[in-house]
Amino acid sequence: MEGKSKAEQQALDAQQKGHTEAKKVSDEAWDRAYKAYKEGKKQADIVYKEAKKMAVDKEAKKEAGKAHKKAIEQAKKLRDAILAEATVVFRCSYDQADADYLETQIKSRMAIKDADETYKEAEKQADVVHKEAKKRAVDKQAKKEANEAYKKAIEQAKQVRDEARHKLR
């Protein structure tokens, strides 16, 4: 398999960079989510311990327990909301990097196809001109020059096509 063109390599590099940045942002969001949860839980635990110490009867201790449980649930919901949003952002960023790379590949392939079609058209035109030049040639030297001009035109068309394909692959 041939190596990648400069354009394809740049697109691949951009895709990989997009994936890396998406992962980094996602990892940071996960870290913040867990830190927020830990801090929320820590604060709920402190409040619960103090409320439990201050409670004078069984009912007050029970209410402190309920409030503690509710605070922990709120901390979990906050953590989960942050994680859900981070996951959406990560997926969108990752998918966009893939879409950009795919678009570059499609454009590259289309340009290669155009270069091939342009070559075929140039070859057809060279054939027509060559045949006409051979008809009009009156001696061997003129036919030889027509053949040389034809070979040169075909070689030049191939070179242009190959350069375009090389840049795009």
Image (cartoon, grey):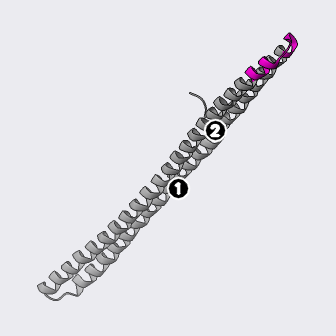
Viewport quadrant of the N terminus:
top right
Q: Quick one: label 2, few (<14), some, or many (20+) residues within 10 Å?
A: many
Q: Amino acid at mark 2?
A: Leu
What is the tally of numbered marks visible in this picture?
A: 2
Residue drawn at x 29%, y 81% as measured from the top left: 47
Region of the chain picked out in magenta, as a range: 130-142
In which image quadrant can residue 166 be found?
A: top right
Residue that label 1 marks? 21
In which image quadrant can residue 82 be found?
A: bottom left
Q: Amino acid at mark 1?
A: Glu
Q: Is residue 144 above or below residue 100?
A: above
| Residue 163 percent location from the top left of the image | 70, 33
| Residue 146 percent location from the top left of the image | 81, 19
In the picture as drawn, the residue positioned furthest to the top comes out as 140
Which is in the foreground here, disc 2 or disc 1? 2
Q: Main secondary structure of the magenta part?
A: helix
- Residue 134 lies in magenta, yes or no? yes
Q: Earlier in the sequence, mark 2 or mark 1?
A: 1
Q: Quick one: label 1, few (<14), some, or many (20+) residues within 10 Å?
A: some
Give the SS element for disc 1.
helix
Residue that label 2 marks? 168
The mark found on residue 165 in the picture is none
Q: Is residue 32 above or below residue 18?
A: below
- For residue 144, side relative to residue 46 (left or right): right
| Residue 60 percent location from the top left of the image | 16, 86
Residue drawn at x 17%, y 83% as measured from the top left: 63
Q: Nearer the viewer, residue 40 or 15?
A: 15
